[in-house]
Amino acid sequence: EIVLTQSPGTLSLSPGERATLSCRASQSVIRTSLAWYQQKPGQAPRLLIHGASSRATGIPDRFSGSGSGTDFTLTISRLEPEDFAVYFCQQYGTSPITFGQGTRLEIK
Amino acid sequence: EVQLVESGGGLVQPGGSLRLSCAASGFAFSGYWMHWVRQVPGKGLVWVSRVGNDGVATAYADSVEGRFTISRDSAKNTAYLQMNSLRVEDTAVYYCARSSSWGDFDYWGQGTLVTVSS
C-alpha cells in the first residue's frame, strides 16, 4: 500500500501568516489522485483539495494545492482564525485508499 | 443539500457484532460509490471499506477482511457496514463518506462511535 508521510507533525503559526504543509508518498500517486482534508475537533473531515490542486466547492482561494508523483503541498496563503485545525492528505488512485497521519496547525 | 447520517454505533463486547447504517439524502444515491472510514479519537483516518454504485464491487482493508461486510440498499438510500467478530482494536468513530466522480470523498457523515470492550 502507499504510505503517506505528512510533515511537520505540528505547525505553530499566527493569523495572517503563510502555512506550508507537506505530504510525501512512498510511491508515485497515479493521476494526481491526491486530496487534502481539514478536520476540526468533534467534526467530520471536510474536503479542501482534490486532484492535487483543484479546490473543492466553496473552499476559499487562500487554500491551494500543488505537486505530483510523490511530493505534494497544501498552502494556506494567509491564515484565518478558523483555519487552525488538523489537515490530512489522502491518495485515492491505488487500492487500498490511504491517508497521511495528519498535520496539526495550531495558533502560535 | 447532501446529507449522510450514520447510526448503529454503541458498546459491544469483544467477539460481538454491530450493524452500522448510513442514511443518504439530497443526491442520487444509486449513482455514487460509498465508503466507511474509521478514526480512533485523536488519531488518524483509516479507510475501512467501499461499495460500488451497483452494490457488487466491494473492497476491504486487510484489518477487517472476512469480518466486516459492506452493502447498500438503493430503495432505502442507505449503506451498511455489518461488523462481526469485533475486537478491541476496532474501537473508533466510523464515518461514511461519498466518493465523488474523481474518487475523493466529497461528503462525510458526522460519525458514529463504536466501542469494543468487556
Image: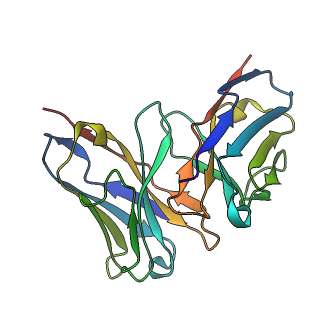
In the displayed structure, would residue A55 be above or below residue A85? below
**Residue A97 in the image: x percent, y percent?**
53, 57
Q: Does residue A49 appear left or right of residue B55 in this picture?
A: right
Whether residue B82 is visible, yes or no, is no
Whether residue A92 is visible, yes or no, is yes
Of residues B31 and A71, the one nearer the viewer is A71
Q: Quadrant of the C terminus of chain B?
A: top left
**Residue B116 in the image: x percent, y percent?**
21, 38
Q: Does residue B20 appear left or right of residue B85 in this picture?
A: right
In the displayed structure, would residue A35 be above or below residue A17? below
Of residues B2 and B49, the one nearer the viewer is B49
**Residue B82 in the image: x percent, y percent?**
24, 61
Q: Residue at x 52, y 33 (%)?
A: A41
Residue at the extreme front of the image, as rendered:
A27
Residue at the extreme top of the image, as rendered:
A108
**Residue A28 in the image: x percent, y percent?**
70, 56
| Colour setting | rainbow
Q: Residue at x 35, y 68 (%)?
A: B79
The image quadrant that residue A108 belongs to is top right
Q: Does residue B39 appear left or right of residue B9 in this picture?
A: right
